[in-house]
Amino acid sequence: SQRREAQFREGGWWFAADEAAQYVENFVIELNDLAPQVAKPFSPDNVLSITETLGQKLDGFFIGACTTTQEELMLAALVLERGMTGGYQPKATDNRIVVPGSIEVAENLQQAGLLEIYRAAGFRVNEPGCSMCLGIASDRALPGEVWLSSQNRNFHNRMGKGSIAWL
C-alpha cells in the first residue's frame, strides 16, 4: 500500500491508516465515559479506575523518569497549579520528587516558570538522571512505602527494596 503522510487537522497533526487497511477487530472507546486510570502493583497492566482507589495510603509522589515527556511534566505542573489556586494545599512531606528527563527539559520547565509550581506544591526538584524509577540512585522508596509515580513500570522492588509503586 502507499505510505500516507501526516495531515494537519483541527490544530494538530494526525496519522491515518491506509483506506484499504484491514483489521482483525475494531473497538470503540467512549473517552467521555472513561475515568482516570491507575495501575496498582505489581504490573502496569493491573489497571483500575481512580475512583476505586479512594482512601489509598500514599507515602510519596514521584514525577519523572526518562519515559516521562516534557509535555507530561508541563501538564502535571499546570494541574498542580490549578489545584492550588482552587484551594487545595498539599500535605507537607519530604517524599515528593520531580526529576526532568534531561537538562534541556529542566531548562525549558524553568524558563516557563513550571519548576516553581512544583516547588510551591512541596516537590523537591532534582537534577536530570536516574532516580526513583530504578531504585538504585540515592533517592529510593523505603521497604513498605507506597508511592504514586509517573514512571512506566511498577514491578516488585522497582523503586527500592520492598517498595510498592502505583502508576
Image (cartoon, rainbow, N blue to C red):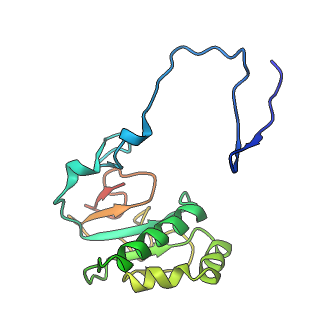
Q: Residue at x 34, y 69 (%)?
A: 61
Residue 138 x, y percent position in the rendering: 42, 77
Q: Is residue 37 above or below residue 23?
A: below
Q: Is residue 48 above or below residue 92?
A: above
- Looking at the rendering, which quadrant does residue 83 occupy? bottom left
Q: Residue at x 43, y 68 (%)?
A: 79
Q: How many numbered tags mark residues here?
A: 0
Residue 77 in sight:
yes
Relative to 15, say whether 65 is above or below. Answer: below
Which residue appears farthest toward the right when viewing the image? Answer: 2
**In the image, residue 162 lies at what x, y percent?**
25, 61
Could you say which is closer to the camera, residue 164 or residue 161?
164
Closer to the camera in the image, 38 or 146: 38
Where residue 82 sits in the image (x, y, percent)? 41, 73
Q: Is residue 12 left or right of residue 139?
A: right
Q: Taking 20 as reference, is 135 left or right? A: left
Question: Can residue 141 be seen?
Answer: no
| Horizontal side, residue 164 vs residue 167: left or right | left
Q: Residue at x 31, y 57 (%)?
A: 165
Quarter-wise, where is residue 105 in the image?
Answer: bottom right
Instruction: Give the image location of residue 164, x and y in percent.
Output: 27, 58
The extreme front residue here reads 10
Residue plotted at (53% across, 60% down): 68
Q: Nearer the viewer, residue 161 or 106?
A: 106
Of the 4 image quadrants, the one containing the C terminus is bottom left
